[in-house]
Image (spheres, coloured by chain):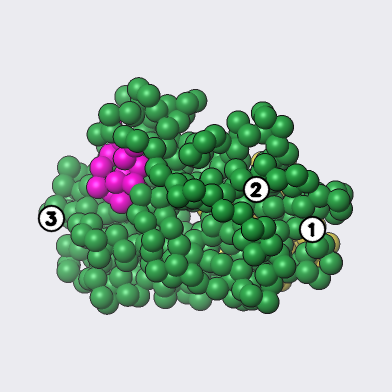
Amino acid sequence: MKYVDEYREKELILSVADELKRISKKEITIMEVCGGHTMAIHRFGLNSLLPPNIHLVSGPGCPVCVSSQQFIDLALAYSRLQGVIITTYGDLVRVPGSSASLEKERAEGSDIRIIYSVLEAIEIARNNPEKKIIFLGIGFETTAPATAAAIMKAKQEHVSNFFVFSAHKIMPPVMEALVREGLKIDGFIAPGHVTAITGTSIYNDLVSVYGLGVVVSGFEPADIMQSVLMLTNQIEKGSPEVKVQYHRVVSHNGNMTARKMLNRVFENRDDQWRGLGLIPSSGLGIIEELSSFDAEKQFDIRVPRSTEPNGCICGQILRGLKTPPECRLFAKKCTPSDPVGACMVSGEGTCATYYKYRS
Amino acid sequence: MCLAIPAKVISVDGKSAKVTIEDVEYTASLLLLDDVKPGDYIMLHAGFAIEKVDPDEAAETLRLLNEIGRNSHF
């Protein structure tokens, strides 16, 4: 596949590994924020190519994993309403809520449909005018513009039975929150597709306030190895900065059309993250002017205060403080086919990735 | 979740494009990306084209990677 296979060439990857061994002296810890990077690192066995003094830890960049228990419980409550069709991206249906999962709710008769694109939800709304279609909006800056575009399309085309329950989140506040709370790292491998939308300036504070290196990386193994090399260079020299490895997709200003769409529909608000709690200005809520599409404004539903599953250390894993094998439930009570916590549900969750590639 | 895959644009019809990934055809919404032409490669994410792939930058990254290889062998 063009723009993929070239960056999987073994020779290239190994030569970057050689160079890393040559220049790396200090003990370095780097967090890969994005679940897509975590998957690629384990799939291609990149950890085994790094010198022993370079450590990679996984971060909170898996939207299914960080969706709060409260969000899942509210989605379950919506799904039990008469005349409602829930639409959502795949993995979310398997996340256990306090009482059930959407998948179990569907088996009980709720109308829950997995879609690939949010635009399908608008089609479902058009084809079912007597029903109310709620889209569960999860995802970061990469995905939220698509939801925004769908809301604007529904507005323009007068589709009035389409609603969004937004759990969309943004990356910089959680990255800063982790560091403020004491995460000991030297730099971030920053998410390539988030940055393709936002541009690179969102990371400036991580450098100027926290003194961390930031390299925006592609997702193929040579991309990730090169990003580790770039970060190592910065850290060895003591000159952290924001750099882009993924130039073929990421520009300095990002995608202005997508950014404008995002700003027309959403505004920042405080948001709950699984295991991390409330993080100021880390979520995206629908602006007041578009509240007719906002499920939270249109359906008056309350659920009891949610609690996270007993014994699950998903929160500490999302903060890079622990690895899945340190959890007593991992690969015993908690497996991909019968997950306890959200980090085992999503294919890009750290627990699911460790499980799949465990030796 | 933020997965996006390079897809080749076959044709453009208003705010929608036909694209292929390894000969399988998909529809990509162009609501988030302007100036897309047949022959371009776009990153496809959840049914939306979110950015173009810049062929010159792609080649430059490969050149840099190859250069690292040459340096580390001498």
**Label 3 chain ID:** A
In front: label 2 or label 3: 2
Q: Amino acid at mark 1?
A: Asn
The picture places residue A59, in percent across and down from the top left corner, at: 35, 51
Q: Which residue is mark 3?
A: A26
Give the SS element for disc 2.
helix
In the image, residue A67 lies in the stretch drawn in magenta: no
Q: Are marks 1 and 2 in contact (CB under 8 Å)?
A: no
- Same subunit, tags 1 and 2: yes
The quadrant of the picture occupied by the N terminus of chain A is top right
Q: Which residue is mark 1?
A: A161
Give the SS element for disc 1.
loop
Q: In the figure, what tint was chain A given?
A: green
Work out whether mark 1 precedes mark 2 in sequence or the reverse, and give the earlier one: 2
Label 1 to label 2: alpha-carbon separation: 14 Å
The magenta span reads A312-325
> Does the image show residue A199?
yes
Q: In the figure, what tint was chain B given?
A: yellow
- Disc number for residue A265: none
Vertical position of residue A141 compared to residue B26: above or below: below
* Residue closer to the observer: B68 or A335: A335
Q: Which residue is mark 2?
A: A78
Residue at the image point whose x is 74% and y is 55% from the top: A119
Residue A47 figure quarter: top left
Residue at the image point whose x is 54% and y is 34% from the top: A100
Q: Amino acid at mark 3?
A: Lys
Residue at the image point whose x is 67% and y is 33% from the top: A106
Give the SS element for disc 3.
loop
In the image, residue A318 lies in the stretch drawn in magenta: yes
